[in-house]
Image: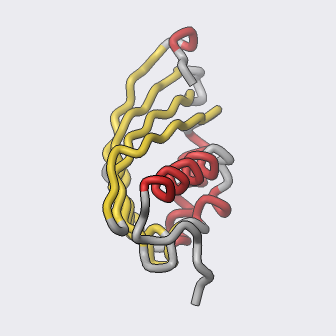
Amino acid sequence: MENKRYPIPPFTLEAALQKVQAAEDTWNTKDPEKVSLAYSIDTEWRNRTDFINGREEVKAFLTRKWQKELDYKLKKELWGFRENRMAVRFEYEWHDQSGQWFRSYGNELWEFDENGYMRRRFASINDLPILESERKL
């Protein structure tokens, strides 16, 4: 049995905003172990065309992600919420090994368990090649 990860559902506006900011802050550490702890042991993800199940697969996915997406910087914004679910828009910037910069845009749907861990995360993401001089983040 895991401890509670506050705030827990049902969410108020303040709690939802806090949860989104915590996610942004944690993802910006680029630490797969630390990020994975926000998700339930049996978490279910769809990330682009990847289907990921469980914390161990999340850690492996994030390790590969940040080996490819260098100098990653993320910004998240709450789009809506109710009870134990949230809709979030995000953008992040990164470059590949060749130095090509990208801005990735997307939306996520989140569902939390009763202890405040994210049980389900479904992400749709598009990548836009940009010049380094066009970076915003």
* Residue 81 visible in the picture: yes
Image quarter of the N terminus: bottom right
- Give 99 or 72, whichever is nearer the viewer: 72
* Residue 51 visible in the picture: no
Name the side, left or right, on which 50 lies relative to 7: left
x and y percentages locating residue 59 in the rendered image: 58, 63
Coloured how?
secondary structure
Residue furthest bottom as drawn: 1
- Give 16 or 127, whichever is nearer the viewer: 16
Q: Identify the residue at horizontal 41%, vertical 45% (top origin).
A: 78
x and y percentages locating residue 129 in the rendered image: 42, 20
**Vertical side of 9 occupied by 136: above or below:** above
Name the side, left or right, on which 104 lies relative to 24: left
x and y percentages locating residue 46 in the rendered image: 34, 58
x and y percentages locating residue 40 in the rendered image: 50, 75
Q: Identify the residue at horizontal 56%, vertical 65% (top origin).
A: 38
